[in-house]
Amino acid sequence: MGTSDPPPEVRAWTLREWLARVRTEADPWRTRFFDALPASTRETIESSGRTAWLPMAIHVELADIMEAAYGPVRAHEHYRRSFAASLREGVFGPLVRTGTRIFGTTPATLLRWLHRGWDASFRNAGRAAGEVLGPGRGQVVYSGLPPVCTASDPWLDSAQGSIYGSLDAIGFDGVVRVDKSTRSEGRMIISIEWSKRARG
């Protein structure tokens, strides 16, 4: 980003929902997270209207705190549960229901509509585009990511848990792989393979 570029930002509702979901977690994880969260950051989030735009650095800060407080495995599980819940009942619920009415309930549907969720949550923070590569295969290509994002492994890795959560929400199993080899160019690619979850 050049010095005249607008700063990357995130909707306050994504941060408020993040804190709300952590509040439902068991201790000691919940306490560890909130003990590590600076009071000024918490105040900024909680005092902002849901549709306000806040610095993207706060979103990254929460990811860094989450991994330090939870560890990478538990943080991954948290993102997986939280994103599944947001697709079922959270702010993305109406968007997902619209997409599934048009295209059906499949991972391909989510990939086609993923950019809408990204654009609703972030601005001046690059883009995320879902691509269907074939039956049971697709990818998410992140491009133009700002340095504040690409410098944080916890932030980049959180996307993997979120995508697993999206598969859980619609009843699919899958394998999600993260390629961060082009992060210095503001890019990341997540490859996805999926199959319908067996009932039983």
Image (spheres, rainbow, N blue to C red):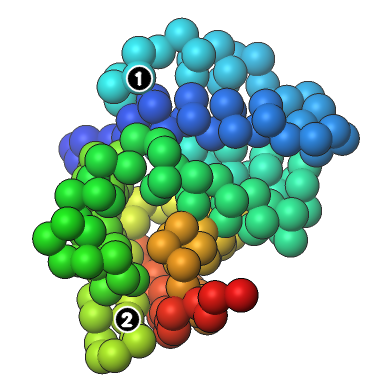
Q: In this orientation, does residue 135 appear?
A: yes
User: Percent from the top left, x then y, of residue 186?
Assistant: 35, 63
Label 2 secondary element: strand
Label 1 secondary element: loop
Instruction: Using residue 75 as the reference point, say whether residue 85 is left or right of it.
Output: left
Q: Residue at x 22, y 59 (%)?
A: 100
Residue with the most extreme front position = 200
What is the quadrant of residue 54 in the picture? Answer: top left
User: Percent from the top left, x then y, of residue 127?
Assistant: 25, 57
Residue with the most extreme top position = 47
User: Percent from the top left, x then y, of residue 132?
Assistant: 24, 80
Camera-side residue: 3 or 137? 137
Q: Residue at x 46, y 58 (%)?
A: 169
Q: Residue at x 77, y 42 (%)?
A: 69
Vertical placement of residue 20 versus 177, above or below = above
Camera-side residue: 187 or 47? 47
Camera-side residue: 197 or 86? 197
| Residue at image mark 1 | 50
Instruction: Using residue 51 as the reference point, say whether residue 154 is left or right of it.
Output: right
Q: In this orientation, does residue 111 appear?
A: no
Query: At label 2, which amino acid type do we have?
Result: Gly
Query: At label 1, which amino acid type do we have?
Result: Arg
Q: Residue at x 61, y 75 (%)?
A: 200
| Residue at image mark 2 | 138
Do the residues under discs 1 and 2 have CB atoms within 8 angstroms? no
Q: Residues within 10 Å of mark 2 (few under 14, many from 20)?
A: many
Give the Cα separation between the discs numbered 1 and 2.
32 Å
Residue with the most extreme left position = 102
